[in-house]
Image (cartoon, rainbow, N blue to C red):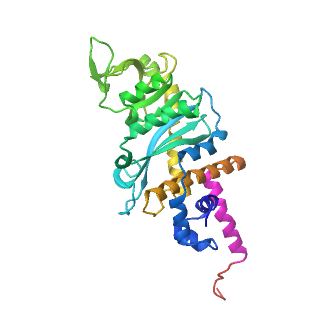
């Protein structure tokens, strides 16, 4: 038998190989089948992850929620359930993988995953936007969090999502795709974002616009990067309460969820499970979140990054080997 704790500690400790066979080789009295049986038997879900995260949150009305999706790359797999061909931002193209929609809570500094959904439309018929709304509703009904501002990119800036956020008495900060049409006045009708005239005052304070089928005005900002790239950002924060710089600062917090995605993959082996069954993949992924959480709590305690913390594990090994090498160099070298 293998326990949840043992499996999570394995994910934290193994340097490269995250397979069931590798764990069985290094844990006395445990067989490959025992590890596979554990992943198939365990029923870990996002709800259990939330229970561990909840005491760590610094929640307030000034806190933020962030939504984004990630693909667990399984491009060399042909028989793993849940795997489908989908777009990966990391690969800038289509890959075979398991899609995950994540919801993160942040106080501006510390951030934690509070919910996630596996994108499997063949199993549950739900789109990524369906998962977005489900998780957001649970924030209010089950988790009862006070965070009022939610950050996301243009993929989730659908009419239904924006309406739901307003109904929940929350604020959004999100981007728009270049081809989105907006209206500055009823007389002018809908125009392309590029056709708006941007006087200095508008660049600083934004401009109120109407989106098609959205029954309320949003404040539109044109954010120009130093390299000339343009990002169109909208919010339902009260007009005049935010400057372009303040909106840019809030929108920039979305990098934290990208950091979560990267650390899950690089430090817990979230993409590396080779089990074929959907249940095993779901259990492995939940354990990866708990492994990430374990690393984060320890990193905060020691005032280190997760990468520094994990590197220290292998630094200790290297120091020991250099002092007392088990494989010495040839005599006379």
Q: How many marks?
A: 0
The C terminus - image quarter: bottom right
Q: Residue at x 61, y 37 (%)?
A: 109
Residue 172, visible in the rendered structure: yes
Report whether 12 appears left or right of 121: right
Report whether 39 appears left or right of 158: right
Image spot of residue 34 (x, y percent): 56, 68
Image spot of residue 223 (x, y percent): 43, 29
Q: Quick one: 133 or 179, which is closer to the camera?
A: 133
The residue segment tinted magenta is 305-324
Q: Quick one: 159 or 281, which is closer to the camera?
A: 281
Image spot of residue 232 (x, y percent): 39, 29
Image spot of residue 31 (x, y percent): 57, 73
Is residue 79 rendered magenta in the image?
A: no
Q: Quick one: 111 or 176, which is closer to the camera?
A: 111
Work out whether 162 lies above or below 18: above
Work out whether 11 lies above or below 115: below
Work out whether 44 lies above or below 245: below
Is residue 322 rendered magenta in the image?
A: yes
Secondary structure, magenta segment, majority class: helix
Q: Residue at x 44, y 34 (%)?
A: 133
Residue 221, visible in the rendered structure: no
Residue most toward the top? 187
The N terminus - image quarter: bottom right
Report whether 329 appears left or right of 211: right
Q: Quick one: 139 or 75, which is closer to the camera?
A: 139
Q: Residue at x 54, y 27 (%)?
A: 148
Residue most toward the front? 41
């Amino acid at each position: 038998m293998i326990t949840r704790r043992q499996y999570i500690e394995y994910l934290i400790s193994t340097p490269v190989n995250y397979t069931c066979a590798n764990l069985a080789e290094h844990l006395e009295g445990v067989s490959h089948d025992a590890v596979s049986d554990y992943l198939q038997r365990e029923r870990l879900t996002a709800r259990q992850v939330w229970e561990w995260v909840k005491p760590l949150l610094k929640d307030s009305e000034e806190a933020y929620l962030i939504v984004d999706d990630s693909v667990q790359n399984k491009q060399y797999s042909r028989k793993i359930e849940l795997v489908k061909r989908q777009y990966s931002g990391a690969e800038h193209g289509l890959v075979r993988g398991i899609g995950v929609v994540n919801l993160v809570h942040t106080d501006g500094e510390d951030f934690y995953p509070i919910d996630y959904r596996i994108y499997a439309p063949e199993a549950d018929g739900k789109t990524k936007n369906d998962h977005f709304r489900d998780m957001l509703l649970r924030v209010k009904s089950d988790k009862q969090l006070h965070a009022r501002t939610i950050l996301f990119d243009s993929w989730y800036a659908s009419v239904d999502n924006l309406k739901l956020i307003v109904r929940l008495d929350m604020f959004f900060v999100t981007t728009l795709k270049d081809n989105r049409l907006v209206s500055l006045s009823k007389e002018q009708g809908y125009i392309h974002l590029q056709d708006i005239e941007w006087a200095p005052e508008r660049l600083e304070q934004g401009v109120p616009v109407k989106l098609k089928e959205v029954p309320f005005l949003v404040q539109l900002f044109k954010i120009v990067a130093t390299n000339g790239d343009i990002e169109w950002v909208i919010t339902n924060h009260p007009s005049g309460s935010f400057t372009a710089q303040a909106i840019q600062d809030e929108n920039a917090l979305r990098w934290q969820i990208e950091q979560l995605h990267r650390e899950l993959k690089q430090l817990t082996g979230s993409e590396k499970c080779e089990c074929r069954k959907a249940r095993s993949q779901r259990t492995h992924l939940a354990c990866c979140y708990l492994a990430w959480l374990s690393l984060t709590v320890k990193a905060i305690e020691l005032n280190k990054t997760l990468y520094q913390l994990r590197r220290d594990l292998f630094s200790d090994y290297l120091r020991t080997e250099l002092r007392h090498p088990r494989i010495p160099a040839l005599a006379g070298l």
